[in-house]
Amino acid sequence: MSNTALIKEFEAIVGADNVMTSETDRHTYSYDAAVLDSVMPALVVRPTNSEQLGKAVKLCNDNGLPLTVRGAGTNLSGGTIPHPGGVVVLTNGLNRILELNEEDMYAVVEPGVVTAQFAAEAAKRGLFYPPDPGSQTVSTIGGNVAENAGGLRGLKYGVTKDYVMGVDFWDVNGELIHSGSRTVKCVTGYNLAGLMVASEGTLGVFDKIILKLIPPVKAAKSMMAIFPSMKAASETVAAIIANKIVPATLELMDNFTIRTVENFRKAGLPTEAAALLLIEVDGHPAQVEEDAIKVEDICKQNKASEVKVANDAAERDAVWQARRDALPALAKLKPTCVLEDATVPRSKIPAMIEALEEVSKKYNLTIGTFGHAGDGNLHPTILTDKRDKKEWERVEEAVDMIFERALALGGTLSGEHGIGLAKSKFMINETSAGTLAYARRMKSVLDPKGILNPGKIIG
Amino acid sequence: MADINKLAQMLKELDDQLVNCMRCGMCQAVCPLFARTGKESDVTRGKLALLDGLASEMLKDPEGVNEKLNRCLLCGTCQANCPSGVKVMDIFLKARAIMTGYFGLSPVKKAIFRGMLANPKLFNKLLDFGSKFQGLFTKKVDDMLGSSCARFQAPVIGDRHFKALAGKPLHKTLPELNSSAGKSGIKVAFFVGCVVDKIFPNVGEATLDVLKHHGVGVFMPANQACCGIPAISSGDTKTFDNLVDQNLALFEKGEFDYLITSCASCTSTIKELWPHMYQGDSAKRMKLRELADKTMDISQFLVDVLGVKAGEPGGESVTYHDPCHLKNSLGITSQPRTLIKASSGYDLKEMAEAGTCCGCGGSFNIAHYELSKQIGERKAGNIVDSGAHIVATSCPACMLQITDMLSQKKAGVKVKHVIELYAEGLR
Ligand SMILES: Cc1cc2nc3c(=O)[nH]c(=O)nc-3n(C[C@H](O)[C@H](O)[C@H](O)COP(=O)(O)OP(=O)(O)OC[C@H]3O[C@@H](n4cnc5c(N)ncnc54)[C@H](O)[C@@H]3O)c2cc1C
Ligand code: SF4
Ligand code: SF4
Ligand code: SF4
């Protein structure tokens, strides 16, 4: 079929306004938040209802057109960088919350619903949706599910997959596939919803998502503990958990990040500290009081030089502002900021920190590290200038080494940013040739023409 | 027209700033335009990517990029919230100047900017004349708001409900002023601004009344030129420089401690754009920097310098709209609220999203009225939902937009400048 005929067909499905063909429009869908080269799609389509979405998927398949679904394009692994000549299917026209059930505590949403807006809507009805990726003000639920996004509350409340009760998705033939249910328990058939989580648009196109909601927490207490060494801070993390306390959040910042944030906000952070832990316990008020005191004690026993407990909302906010400032403050230092996602078992955090120091020295790069200490998910952030070719080569090597080390410590390639294009070449190191072959066989049957986000995850 | 490689070369100037955008996409959360259209080319990240694409010669369609670049309110919300600290306004304004250099200024804009704005005396005359005859073409629609609409189908007016030109602009009632400092011991220069002068002279009068009340001396030279924001946002650096030159020559003649305005757009233009975008000689740029350091919004002056404090709450409820040019460019949000609380007979009642753009965006309103209206309708909805009887703000351009929206909605809410409320209480 000729190009113009195809465009006409897409226009017949979604309306002429929702098919973008100009060079400028296409260029703005050629990248995402990953530091990778952009690739121009041939076409961008924006369905506004379920039926249009299904038809658009089928039309792509009928014509063997590579299809990349795009939510907000905030993933950090190139998951929405289109295949050359492919079609980008935008989901931000599918942004309705279809059902918010207070009695049974679940919601049914379209994939383009923005995470923070959904959480706010749930909160209005007295319910709580815990997954809160740093990008939540813009990221979409579809993107969250496709990346299995996690957030600051991952340690206690889990990540997106822990809230997905069901996913309805379009297969390449334009059949709507149902999975999961509105019930807490469901063992009907294969766990296809589970398969869709972290599938990064390579197995099906989400149409509707059923999400679990929980009752809101009654009370919370935050504190900031100051440590003379990274080792002491990470031992504290292990000690807190060993004492059977699971904080809602347990965040770590290294000295470089502390100094950068302080420079940026002048909020009075201890710039001489080697590490900071930002901790929040939540739950029933009495329990929160008890846990907070215990955590404070554990910190002190583990060489914390000081523990500042927030006494009111303003102080609590100051604690979290420091954490929120980490990325922005680092990002301002250099033109390019490569945010990595190395994740290791909690007990291996000191070893990983050591490895990062080694990487930074070996390749002569500035690396600031912060992250979710509670779940072993660190964000070493390399500050560089992509235009400096020599340095950029060192950055690429450094990234390779970070993954090697994380894997050697029993860790994983990605705690939350996905594999996409950026890390597909490392997949074999964490899994095995057999695993990859299994995944490829599965995909080749479900997507025989290989149109669904080709090149991502499994290469 | 220069060739496209040349354009790319010119845009390369912006490279150091463009590269700071890490493409995180967080601007999608705050851009009022993106909230309406959901198109990546309407949000900062997309526009920056387009400029980058043109600079690196990946794109071959400068017209297309230019068109997208102009679909922007220049509200600065993205810049104020960008985690990477990208100087978005600076990039956009410079890019517009480069684009205008490349494509040339449209004949209509050329006529308006160079023929009219750049010539304050003529501009005043033309509009004085216009104010006499506007009744022939327009009719009143809302007495409370004083808004009008077109009598006949008129392309520029469309279905707008606009504030007509004042019968007697400020420069007619009071062409100039040079009073000495009273009990405050302070003297200020007053930059009136076109919209205050020609459409809301009452705001200018209120400002002068308040200054007098507080014993502040005022230097207000005659024939002030426009601050230049319409020209510079269209990339017309030539007219901009000319206007800045004219104003500098006028204000150089006076001695004063502060330069104040009651127009948020003018304040931010004088403070940020005069020293930064002016391309004249360095001696003049130094002077502009000094002037910029002295420049203040009227509420900021009253609260921070004169120490005006909030009074007892009570009376008619007022809600406050934060003009982008005050909130995003200068970070001023508390002083106008303090001033409302200092105005006797009024009670501040916050609206939802007080700090989001009203959708005016100067020439954006003219070029993209439908979008401008959609953004404004949300603002009007929030104003009405606040339950307040009056909406106050600090920018006459916002007053125009909000008047249009409330008038079309028949909302029954008055639109005032905060200084008017404060002045009333003193009388
Ligand atoms: C500043 C910043 C902070 C971040 N913080 C976190 C964090 O704390 N935790 C975290 O986990 N991630 C984080 N991320 C990464 C990113 O925001 C998440 O991966 C997020 O889930 C992506 O959502 P999105 O809507 O932008 O998806 P996109 O980036 O648009 O897409 C992501 C993937 O999902 C697929 N997809 C999207 N919609 C569908 C659909 N309907 N059907 C099938 N596939 C689909 C796409 O094809 C793509 O492979 C952060 C990113 C940034 C820029
Ligand atoms: S928020 Fe700033 S850095 Fe992020 S995409 Fe927008 S302009 Fe770029
Ligand atoms: S200036 Fe305003 S309208 Fe323009 S891109 Fe930024 S936020 Fe959007
Ligand atoms: S109000 Fe607008 S038009 Fe006027 S002086 Fe300020 S910017 Fe110029």
Image (cartoon, rainbow, N blue to C red):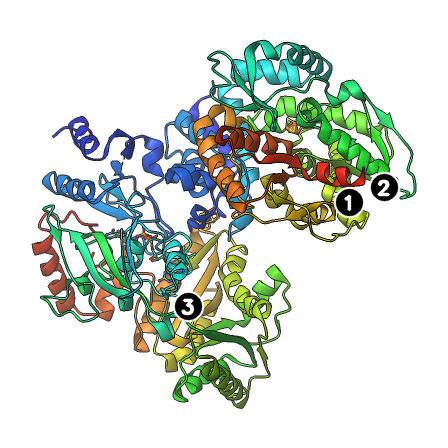
Indicate the quadrant where residue B371 lies. Answer: top left
Asked if the beta carbon under badge 3 is closer than 8 A to the nearest atom of ligand 1, the reply is yes
Same chain letter for marks 3 and 1: no
Q: In this view, does A146 lie above or below B336?
A: below
Identified by mark 3, the residue type is Leu
> In the drawing, what numbered circle is on residue A152?
3
> Mark 3 falls within which chain?
A
Is the C-beta separation of discs 1 and 2 under 8 Å? yes
Q: Residues within 10 Å of mark 1 (few under 14, many from 20)?
A: many
How much space separates mark 3 and mark 1, taking CA atoms?
Answer: 43 Å
Amino acid type at circle 2 is: His
Measure the C-alpha gap from mark 2 to mark 3.
52 Å
Residue A122 on image: x %, y %: 37, 60
Query: Is A38 or B125 nearer to us in this picture?
Result: B125
Q: Residue furthest front?
A: B315
Q: Are marks 2 and 3 on the same chain?
A: no
Residue ID for mark 1: B302
Residue at x-position 48% and y-position 59%: A383
Q: Is residue B219 left or right of residue A399?
A: right
- Give me the chain letter of mark 2: B
Give the residue displayed 65% in from the left and 25% down from the top.
B240
Q: Where is residue B176 in the image (x, y as percent from the top left)?
A: 83, 23
| Chain containing mark 1 | B
On whether disc 1 and disc 2 are found on a single subunit, the reply is: yes
Q: How many marks?
A: 3
- Residue at 55% across / 44% down in the picture? B87
Label 3 crowd (10 A; few <14 / some 14-19 / many >=20) = many
